[in-house]
Image (cartoon, coloured by chain):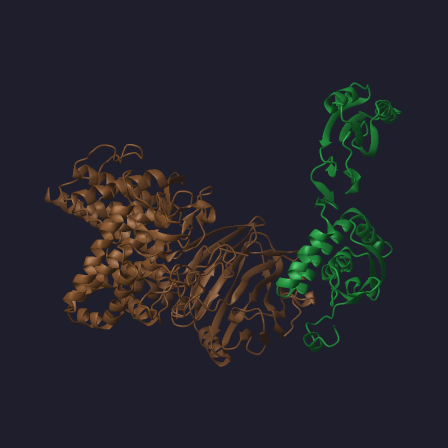
């Protein structure tokens, strides 16, 4: 997601943020030619991204900071005049907050959106405060997300016992949801997940109860889809309750239906 | 989430609403307004690889009623070559829905057939309890004295009772079906759901049938008994008994002929169908015990986008019982007016709306300024209309029964109209506070009706007093609200005359008869009003024109309404019948929307024009019905599809009135042709 996204805080009145999407011939030195040109014209490169489109052409997306008096259209035409350049598109980030060359964003195979953690936590809080069975509802919502994620990873890489945990951890870090430490035995389906800086617990504020049911559900969905077996994940410790970090316990879901203990809930909670 | 039905079925104790693909949306037992026991209930197929939910977009569906019955046929087609034919009927004597699923597949199929339900028994997801009795093969869910059960033939071979929304998600029956097998948990409590499963083994082009009975009862014992008894009867027998029940009930209707509509392709048959469908629909909205009607089966019980429809409004019900009376079913008037006597408030008025048992319903009309005085006017008016139709001993008995109620209601209307127009209250659309043309007309009609009943009861003094006030109201309404533009103002809102044109001003003519075509000036006023409403409130939808409620209406996107469109056509038909009768013949070329009424016409031409314009409205209304012929409240202005409350009782009563009036016009014309 981050690859084609430019985000910065602050706003410089004398400059403008302009992105260029440059399709160029993939010849030795052609990319350098482009970057040299930008540098020579005082276009400060904030962020650049390369994409190999075909064997013959490449795509270079670059965010630049230009002086206010530079005409981006004129600048784009000049880039296009370079021998190695085939096509140039450009756009302006008027308020310099968030901009993306490609719209819509893509997160692991499907459309993604960016949101402030608070925006999502507000939804979670509203559900907790007003909706019956909010915890179950959030678990189910997370379950679906985790299942989709595991399905996607299975489709693009060899998800196996040596990498399933790292892939999940990388994803969580990549999308800013939290830093994971996962211990899970693929033979017994038991283990735990430590979440540091969970975006839910961080922003939620103080709570008497754990608040990351959505995340537990997500883990359960991911692991259930990966193992092909129902996995229970429950949060036993949550940063929102004053703990240092959040902890989720992994165990195989009991088979053969709901046993007495689940109805009575003595052992589960 | 708001879900609107495409079809309804039921019997005296049970009302079921369903979506286009046979998914149950509402399961009301034992009353039409309470309790609604179902959140979701539908079938799905596990192909061996994945679940196919029958309400999914992957299926194409055709749904209709078996002719002249409340039996429903739904046919579903899936791209993979699977076809499901569902036959739904409710036994006429017991509250049990019987669902026959016939499944066919072009290719060999080795999978499962599942029936999934998320019941909220007692209209609550809390404190429910469910179990699977594996000896009798009955799935039961209950709360207090409501018991809902599922039985099947052949018996289901697997099942699951699980938590519908909980952190122990793997017990959820909906989730449990995804791997193609159920966990067979036998009991659970709380917010629960259930599923039953059968092996589905089909050879290419093979078929398999499953019959599912969903029953309701007030005790576990009764539920078991009902299911056991029904399971002994062949489906063909139940089908025939149910079909016969509806056909017999319809056979009592006022016979219509509508001769002479040959130039309108198939219209006559469409009107016969619409007439029968409206009657069958109204049966299902009526509470047989109390005589009240739900305005529509509830579909927004959380009042997310409106105030809900699953209650009884006197305004709607008074229209409905009179339409049913004119259609050959007088007993609905008897029952409803009994209910009115019971529900009248201590000040003589009627409340905004009620639960069907007569308890006052959730309301935004709890004060004198927010009550709807027209509901009291409408009720009195309807009592008098009914009285006038009665004959002999029944007449005297009815008057005796309602007299005290009439007196109290009339005095309430007197109290609220001292200045000749009513005191501030809420309008019939339940949106504005103020003084309204429609409300004044209904009060006029109520007091005139009461005056007539007083006279009949030997109370000449009261009769004179009430009539005098009615005439005062009529004069004051005309003086203050009639505009030189040729229509009544909507009323006074925020102490200012609101000149918005509102279709409800038609009430001054139909039904309330404050304006009479016998008076030459009033005749012109009616004509102007009809013309102006048609010109100013028409919206082009479905290759025709529907009438919206009023200018700048914003409720549910300001769609055109079936009610207002049929109200206009009713006024046109009534006006055609009220014009001095001359020998007429129908136009072979109906006038266009633009040219009608623009020049002074001789009565013969006028009758022709009015009738043809009315027919256009009728056709437009029928085009806005569901695939099953149910008339909604509105028609979506961009898609032309039925919108919002489906079906609406008021729309049903108006289509009956329209068809009966058109029948009268056609018969008069046919008689005339025969004479010639």
| Figure quadrant of the N terminus of chain B | bottom right
Towards the viewer: B283 or A47: A47
Instruction: From this view, report whether residue B592 is shown above or below residue B442.
Output: above
| Figure quadrant of the C terminus of chain B | top left
Q: How many marks?
A: 0
**Which shade is chain B?**
brown
Q: Position of residue B542 (x, y in %)?
A: 41, 41
Q: Position of residue A112 (x, y in %)?
A: 71, 45
Q: Position of residue B325 (x, y in %)?
A: 26, 61
**Which shade is chain A?**
green
Residue found farthest to the left:
B675
Picture quadrant where residue A248 is located = bottom right
Residue drawn at 30 percent across, 34 percent down:
B592
Residue found farthest to the bottom:
B221
In this rendering, does residue B513 appear at all? no
**In the rendered view, does B2 fall on the left or right side of B619?**
right
Towards the viewer: B98 or A29: A29
Instruction: From this view, report whether residue B59 is shown above or below residue B395.
Output: above
Picture quadrant where residue B380 is located = bottom left
Q: Position of residue B605 (x, y in %)?
A: 19, 37
In this rendering, does residue B583 appear at all? yes
């Amino acid at each position: 997601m981050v690859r084609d996204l430019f985000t910065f805080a602050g706003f410089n009145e004398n400059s403008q943020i302009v992105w260029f999407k440059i399709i160029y011939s993939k010849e030795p030195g052609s990319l350098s030619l482009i970057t040299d040109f930008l540098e020579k014209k005082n276009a400060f490169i904030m962020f650049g991204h390369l994409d190999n489109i075909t064997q013959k052409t490449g795509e270079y997306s670059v965010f630049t900071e230009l002086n206010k008096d530079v005409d981006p259209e004129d600048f784009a035409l000049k880039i296009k005049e370079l021998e190695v350049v085939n096509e140039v598109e450009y756009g302006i980030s008027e308020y310099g907050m968030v901009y993306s060359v490609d719209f819509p964003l893509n997160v692991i195979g499907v459309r993604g959106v960016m949101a402030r953690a608070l925006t999502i936590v507000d939804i979670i809080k509203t559900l907790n405060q007003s909706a019956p069975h909010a915890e179950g509802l959030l678990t189910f919502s997370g379950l679906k997300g985790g299942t989709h994620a595991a399905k996607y990873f299975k489709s693009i890489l060899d998800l196996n016992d040596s990498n399933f945990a790292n892939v999940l951890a990388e994803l969580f870090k990549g999308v800013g949801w939290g830093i994971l430490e996962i211990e899970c035995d693929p033979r017994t389906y038991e283990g735990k997940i430590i979440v540091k800086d969970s975006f839910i617990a961080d922003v939620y504020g103080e709570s008497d109860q754990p608040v990351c049911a959505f995340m537990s559900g997500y883990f359960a969905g991911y692991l259930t889809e990966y193992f092909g077996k129902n996995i229970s994940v429950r949060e036993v410790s949550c940063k929102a309750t004053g703990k240092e970090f959040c902890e989720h316990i992994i165990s195989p879901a009991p088979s053969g239906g709901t046993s007495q203990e689940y109805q009575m809930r003595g052992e589960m909670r | 989430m708001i879900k609107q039905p495409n079809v309804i079925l039921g019997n005296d104790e049970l009302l079921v609403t369903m979506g286009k693909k046979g998914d149950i949306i509402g399961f009301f037992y034992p009353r039409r307004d309470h309790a609604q026991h179902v959140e979701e209930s539908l079938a799905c197929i596990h192909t061996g690889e994945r679940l196919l939910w029958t309400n999914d977009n992957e299926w194409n569906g055709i749904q209709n009623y078996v002719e002249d019955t409340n039996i429903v046929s739904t046919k579903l087609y899936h791209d993979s070559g699977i076809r499901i034919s569902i036959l739904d009927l409710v036994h006429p004597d017991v509250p049990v829905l019987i669902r026959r699923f016939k499944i066919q597949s072009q290719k060999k199929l080795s999978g499962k057939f599942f029936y999934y339900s998320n019941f909220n028994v007692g209209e609550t997801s809390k404190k429910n309890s469910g179990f699977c009795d594996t000896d009798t093969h009955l799935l039961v869910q209950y709360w207090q004295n409501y018991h809902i059960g599922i039985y099947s033939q052949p018996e289901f071979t697997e099942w699951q009772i699980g938590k519908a929304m909980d952190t122990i998600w793997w017990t959820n029956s909906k989730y449990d079906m995804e791997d193609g097998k159920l966990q067979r948990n036998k009991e659970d409590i709380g917010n629960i759901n259930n599923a039953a499963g059968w092996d589905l083994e089909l050879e290419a082009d093979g078929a398999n049938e499953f019959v599912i009975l969903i029953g309701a009862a007030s005790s576990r014992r009764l539920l078991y008994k009902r299911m056991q008894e029904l399971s002994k009867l062949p489906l063909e027998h139940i089908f025939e008994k149910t079909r016969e029940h509806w056909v017999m009930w319809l056979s009592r209707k006022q016979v219509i002929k509508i001769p002479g509509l040959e130039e309108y392709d198939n219209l006559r048959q469409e009107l016969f169908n619409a007439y029968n469908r409206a009657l069958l629909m109204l049966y299902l909205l009526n509470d047989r015990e109390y005589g009240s009607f739900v305005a529509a089966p509830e579909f927004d019980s959380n009042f997310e986008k409106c105030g809900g429809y699953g209650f009884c409004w006197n305004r709607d019900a008074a229209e409905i019982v009179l339409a049913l009376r004119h259609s050959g079913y007088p007993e609905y008037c008897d029952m409803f007016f009994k209910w009115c006597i019971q529900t009248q408030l201590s000040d003589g008025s009627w409340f905004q709306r009620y639960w069907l048992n007569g308890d006052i319903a959730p309301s935004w009309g709890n004060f004198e300024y927010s009550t709807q005085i027209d509901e009291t006017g409408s009720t009195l008016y309807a009592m008098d209309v009914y009285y006038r139709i009665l004959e002999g001993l029944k007449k005297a008995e009815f008057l005796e029964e309602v007299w005290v109620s009439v007196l109290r209601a009339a005095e309430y209307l007197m109290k609220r109209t001292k200045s000749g127009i009513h005191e501030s209250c809420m309008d019939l659309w339940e949106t504005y506070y103020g003084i309204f043309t429609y409300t004044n007309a209904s009060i006029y009609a109520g007091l005139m009706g009461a005056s007539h009943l007083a006279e009949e009861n030997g109370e000449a003094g009261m009769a004179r007093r009430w009539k005098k006030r009615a005439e005062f109201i009529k004069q004051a309404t005309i003086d203050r609200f009639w505009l030189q533009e040729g229509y009544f103002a909507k009323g006074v809102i925020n102490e200012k005359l609101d000149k918005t044109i509102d279709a409800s001003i038609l009430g001054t003519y139909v039904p309330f008869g404050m304006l009479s075509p016998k008076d030459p000036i009033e005749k012109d006023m009616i004509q102007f009003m009809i013309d102006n409403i048609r010109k100013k409130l028409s919206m082009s939808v479905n290759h025709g024109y529907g009438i919206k409620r009023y200018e700048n209406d914003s409720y549910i996107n300001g769609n055109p309404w079936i009610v207002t469109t049929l109200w206009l056509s009713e006024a046109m038909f009534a006006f055609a019948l009220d014009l001095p009768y001359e020998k007429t013949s129908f136009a072979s070329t109906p006038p266009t929307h633009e040219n009608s009424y623009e020049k002074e016409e001789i009565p013969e031409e006028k009758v022709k024009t009015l009738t043809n314009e009315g027919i256009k409205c009728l056709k437009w209304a029928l085009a806005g019905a569901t695939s099953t012929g149910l008339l909604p409240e509105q028609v979506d202005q961009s898609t032309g599809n039925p919108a919002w409350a489906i079906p609406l009782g008021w729309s049903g009563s108006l289509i009956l009135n329209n068809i009966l009036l058109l029948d009268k016009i056609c018969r008069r014309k046919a008689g005339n042709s025969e004479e010639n």
